[in-house]
Every structure is written in structure tokens, then in C-alpha cells.
Amino acid sequence: MNCYYHPDRPSVARCVVCGKDLCTDCNIIKEGQNYCRDCLGMGEVPVELGKILLPALGCGLLGGVLSIIPIVQYVNCACCLWIILAGGLAVFILKRYHNIKGKISTGNALITGGLAGFVASFITLLPVMLFPDMVYSIVDETLRSPEFQETFQDAGIALDASFFVALAAVILVIAYSLFGALGGIISNEITK
């Protein structure tokens, strides 16, 4: 038999829903069963949210650790490279671990990568949470420099170290979640 979608290719499986013969490119395996893209809706394999958690947490932990290791962290300056890779790796591992062929939904790729980035942001903020006095004193010293005093006083902004640390933390969490989601979407598109 030949593939329903590619008549020039031999089939390797049959869809359990409609019975179409499928080649290796068209066969989508979900939980040990063979499906065609029509039966799974546009070629996207549905994934339960519970399956997303472990790859996202593990890859988020890895991305966060790589973001705080001295010297290695400087590579992260290139558009949050470690976080994009962590989000992409989370989707890749999710698909391999659960033997998913084809694409998962864009929403699930976004959630998986975004969760990895979210976890990485908290790992990156761990030194701030463990040593807040040291961080606040460094920020406060920076804010007292004449350049900062002049700039912010002209704008009418009060200089408070705790405000700037909290603002930086919120921006970091949002940015890492977005970069992780980007990595998840990219990985979903390029991996089979």
C-alpha cells in the first residue's frame, strides 16, 4: 500500500480513526497510536498540560542556572540566548519523551517554552531573593551617583532602590517568559 497523501511513497502505518495509509512523514503517533493530520486537526497533536510541566521545569532550571553562572551568563546577553534555548529544548524534550511526531499546537508550544522561561527567571532572581541587602546597597550606591541624580531629578522621579529592584525583577520575569515562549514556538516549527 502507498501513502494516502503521498501516493509515490510506501505506507508504514494506518490511521486508527479513518484507516488512511500513511508514510513516515504523515504518520503522527500519539500515545502509541497512529493518526493522520486530518484526524488530529491540521497536523497538530494535542498534548495534555500535565505532560508539559516536567520538561518545562527541567529546562527552565537549566536555562536559569546557565544565566547566572559567571562568564557563561555573558552569552545570555545575545537576546536571552539561554532562555530561548531552554524554551526550545523544553518543547523538543516534550515531543521526544512522549513520542509525538509532528507539531503540537502553537498554544502548547507557547505554554511549554513560556513556562521554561518563567522558571528560569526565578532561578536568575534567586541571588536577589537570598541576598537582598547586598543587592539593594549596590543599587542604592548606583542611584546616588551624580549622573543618576541629575537625570531622575530633572524628570521628577524619586530614587528608591527597592522600586528599581522590583521593577527590574518584573521586567526580567516578563522578558524571560516571552523569550522562552519564542524558543518553544521555534522548536515546534523546526522539529518533527
Image (cartoon, helix red, strand yellow):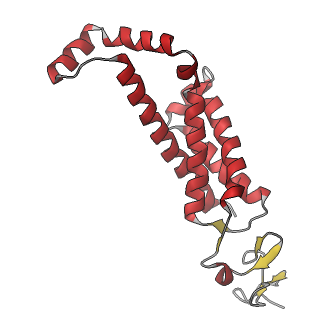
Q: Position of residue 163 (x, y in %)?
A: 35, 23
The image quarter containing residue 129 is top right
Looking at the rendered structure, the number of numbered marks drawn on it comes to 0
Horizontal side of 91 relative to 114 (left or right) equals right
47 w.r.t. 55: above or below: below
Q: Position of residue 95 (x, y in %)?
A: 72, 59
Instruction: Inspect this view and state whether residue 79 appears.
Output: no
The image quarter containing residue 35 is bottom right
172 w.r.t. 142: above or below: below
The residue at 67%/43% (across/down) is: 57
Q: Position of residue 188 (x, y in %)?
A: 62, 60
The residue at 55%/35% (across/down) is: 121
178 w.r.t. 96: above or below: above
Instruction: Inspect this view and state whether residue 192 appears.
Output: yes
Horizontal side of 76 relative to 55 (left or right) equals left
The residue at 46%/41% (across/down) is: 174
Quadrant the N terminus occupies: bottom right
The residue at 55%/46% (across/down) is: 180
77 w.r.t. 27: above or below: above
Q: Nearer the viewer, residue 54 or 24?
A: 54
Q: Nearer the viewer, residue 64 or 57?
A: 57
The image quarter containing residue 165 is top left
Q: Position of residue 71 (x, y in %)?
A: 60, 21
Horizontal side of 31 relative to 56 (left or right) equals right
Quadrant the C terminus occupies: bottom right
